[in-house]
Image: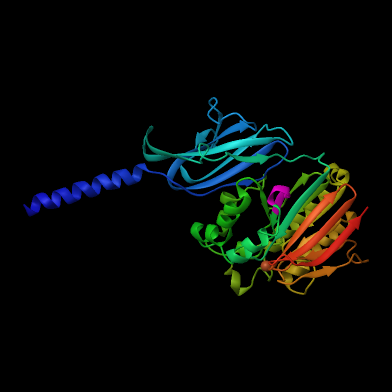
Amino acid sequence: MKQILALLIIFTSLLCAVAQNNSVRIMYGPYLQNIDTNEATITWVTDTPSVGWIELAHDGNDSFYNYERQRYFDTTDGIKNISTIHSVTIKGLSSNTTYRYRTYAQAVVSHEGNRVMYGDYAATNVYSQEPLRFTTLCHEAEQVSFAVINDIHGDNNRMSNLIAQCDLSATDLFIFNGDMASMYNSEEQIFGDFVSTAVSTFAGETPFYYTRGNHETRGSYAHKFHDYFSTGSSSLYYTFRQGPVLFVILDSGEDKADSDIEYYGLVEYDNYRTRQAEWLEGVINSEAYRNAPLKVVVSHIPPMGDWHGNNEVKNKFVEVLRQAAPDIMLCAHEHELIYSESNSNTPFPILINAHNTIVKVKATQSNMQIDVVDEKGKTIATYNYSK
Ligand SMILES: [Fe+2]
């Protein structure tokens, strides 16, 4: 009798295990990355290895179920990725156009030789709620409205309070200017520290563009940054334009010398910043830069202060920017609000946002209005630039 009972328990456990392996759940996301004029990247994470894809539909009042929507798979070199992290870049989109989308995953139970056993599906809801939507960028747009937060260090409560200061329907994009987490140690920690808050408030429909801070360079998951966050290029410094503003996103690296004990011999940022300065030289000499009515440079570490990282930003990046001054440089890192007027050394203003304030910007072809707002909605500072 005892043997039969033991066999029954083993059999039931095996059934449960098989059932568990068949299931799949979207754990994190979806969230938008690298929205541009003709492409968009959508990222999401499942709890079990799966294949993933996006169904895309034009905006409209027709049901998402009207007909089979075009599918875009998560692939590498033509092979569908069997992974828990899915990222699909859809190209060939039209500028200034709204799309609806549904995120899909199908569990992969086993993959032996060329035989693949599939399990359950998971998808975002398009039945009892509106499908998620995004709108591509537009260089010709008359204006852009964006918000910047930084140095959140995993404080979701503060992050929620700051996001709550924005009219999300009137905010084109967010910039996360670094140190959103204090370290990158695991997927659970990265999402728990800030990404899930972004997803639950806006990131499925409004993109955030990420500027790496020095704290994102730390921890055993730091080298996985690209797996979760797409810049639209192979590097973490990049540009994009919405309306009148060309955004130049820099990656200022760490704040101390590369040999510092804190980095355990793992980093090489001096050479990285030198190569980046060469890239920046190309940016300021490009037609895209010259033709943009307004230029906003974003760097986590500011060019003020006397730590090694600050000096590097000043000596390598500002040195280049001096030749074609942007309209403003937005920085972070210092956990206090600091503003520096344009001067002979740095011929453009620098605004360092604090850890507990949000920078809200409205820019037209000839004007940029910047409000710095605290968690309770109080406007701490206002700057206005007219051209
Ligand atoms: Fe920092």
Q: Tag count in the figure? A: 0
Q: Is residue 286 magenta?
A: no
Give the magenta-colored segment's residue range: 168-174
- Residue 259 at x, y percent in the picture: 64, 71
- Residue 355 at x, y percent in the picture: 69, 68
Q: Is residue 149 left or right of residue 122?
A: right
In the rendered view, tell whether residue 250 sits above or below residue 105: below
Judge by depth and name the residue closer to the eye, 336 or 260.
Answer: 336
Visible residue check, residue 346: yes
- Look at 77% across and 64% down and name the residue there: 372
Q: Is residue 283 left or right of residue 72?
A: right
Visible residue check, residue 235: no
- Look at 79% across and 48% down and name the residue there: 144
Q: Seen from this angle, which residue lies furthest top? A: 67
**Ligand 1 location (quadrant):** bottom right
Q: Is residue 91 left or right of residue 13?
A: right
- Look at 72% across and 50% down and name the residue there: 171
Colour style of the rendered protein structure: rainbow
Q: Is residue 171 magenta?
A: yes
- Look at 72% across and 58% down and name the residue there: 148
- Residue 184 at x, y percent in the picture: 55, 62
Q: Is residue 113 left or right of residue 259?
A: left
Query: Residue 149, located in which quarter of the rendered image?
Result: bottom right
- Residue 26 at x, y percent in the picture: 47, 46
In the rendered view, tell whether residue 115 sits above or below residue 246: above
